[in-house]
Image (cartoon, rainbow, N blue to C red):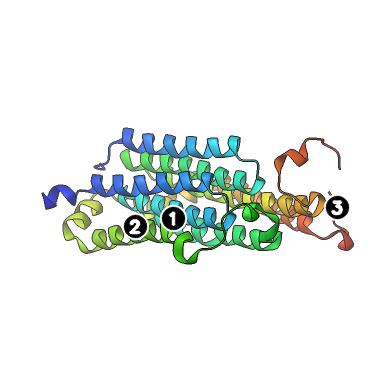
Amino acid sequence: MIKELASIESLFYLAASIAVIASLKVVSRKNTIHALLYLVVSLLAVAVCFYLMGAPFAAGLEVIVYAGAILVLFVFAVMMFGLSQDDVKHAPQAKGISHWVGPVILALCLLAEILFTIESADVQQRLNATIVSSKDVGILLYGPYLLAVEIASFLLLAGLVAGYHYAKPEAQGGHL
Amino acid sequence: MTTIPLEHVLILASILFIIGFVGVIVRKNTLFMLMSLEVMLNAVGVAFIGAGSVWQAADGQVMFILILTLAAAEVAVGLALLVRMQHCFKSLDIDCLNQLKG
């Protein structure tokens, strides 16, 4: 029974259902910050899915870049917009812990799952057989996909220039 | 060879993609539309990683990294446009943008 419970598939299904629930909450919340919290949980759940699929490098990138960098951008933008301007006046006022208890429960489920995965020698052994190593990814990235990497760097440069240009205040010469 | 069947990975990817798509269609707030776009891009990443792990090829992860850069650039430009939109219209409602005129 415990072996059945511990299989990689069931761990994957648990993380997948957490991702689906959190994504549903993202598109259905009224308040921006609450939706952002659920978006973080959704991205972390997808990262756990990546880990269980044998792509630990992609899981790390998902946590660092998506949940770390992109979500911080979102939070900065929300702070700049001012929460009073948003849907927040239609949402119920803060009632103690009730707003963040949902994301916290989902995130604790993910934490328990990842701890179990790391602790269980059996699961680790089966995961190790399926890993696509980051060395292969690097060799491929700077071999056959070199042109794609260059184009991606140009895309990031374009994003940088466009973000700088659009967000500049009118007084400093910014215009659409 | 991974133990998770490819069909289930693709089902998860399609569910996440459809949730994000419905979010883009239904929500009026532009910020929520950007978040739903993130969910959609993430779903595509799930499909790529799943396929890559089934065939034991690193190409799936390479594609995921490219999607990651695309998402980062998209969010930077989109949020800058949103800042400008908030400045011009004092609102993030997408219906404010129905007359393509500055």
The answer to which of marks 1 and 2 sits earlier in the sequence is 1
- Residue where numbered disc 1 is placed: A41
Name the chain under label 3.
Answer: A
Q: Find the residue positioned furthest to the left.
A: A1
- Residue where numbered disc 3 is placed: A175
Q: Position of residue A31 (x, y in %)?
A: 58, 54
Total marks shown come to 3
The answer to which of marks 3 and 1 sits earlier in the sequence is 1
- Residue for point 76% across, 50% down: B85
- Residue for point 34% across, 49% down: A15
Q: Residues within 10 Å of mark 1 (few under 14, many from 20)?
A: many
Q: Residues within 10 Å of mark 2 (few under 14, many from 20)?
A: many
Q: Nearer the viewer, residue B43 or B84?
A: B84
Dividing the picture into quadrants, the one containing residue B7 is top left
- Disc 2 residue type (three-letter): Leu
- Disc 1 residue type (three-letter): Val
Q: Please state if A115 lies on the left or on the right of A88 as rendered.
A: left
The answer to which of marks 3 and 2 sits earlier in the sequence is 2
Dividing the picture into quadrants, the one containing residue A173 is bottom right
Q: Please state if A6 lies on the left or on the right of A54 as rendered.
A: left
- Residue A155, compared with residue A119, is above or below; it is above
Say if residue A138 shows up in the picture. Answer: no
Q: Are marks 1 and 2 in contact (CB under 8 Å)?
A: yes
- Residue where numbered disc 2 is placed: A110
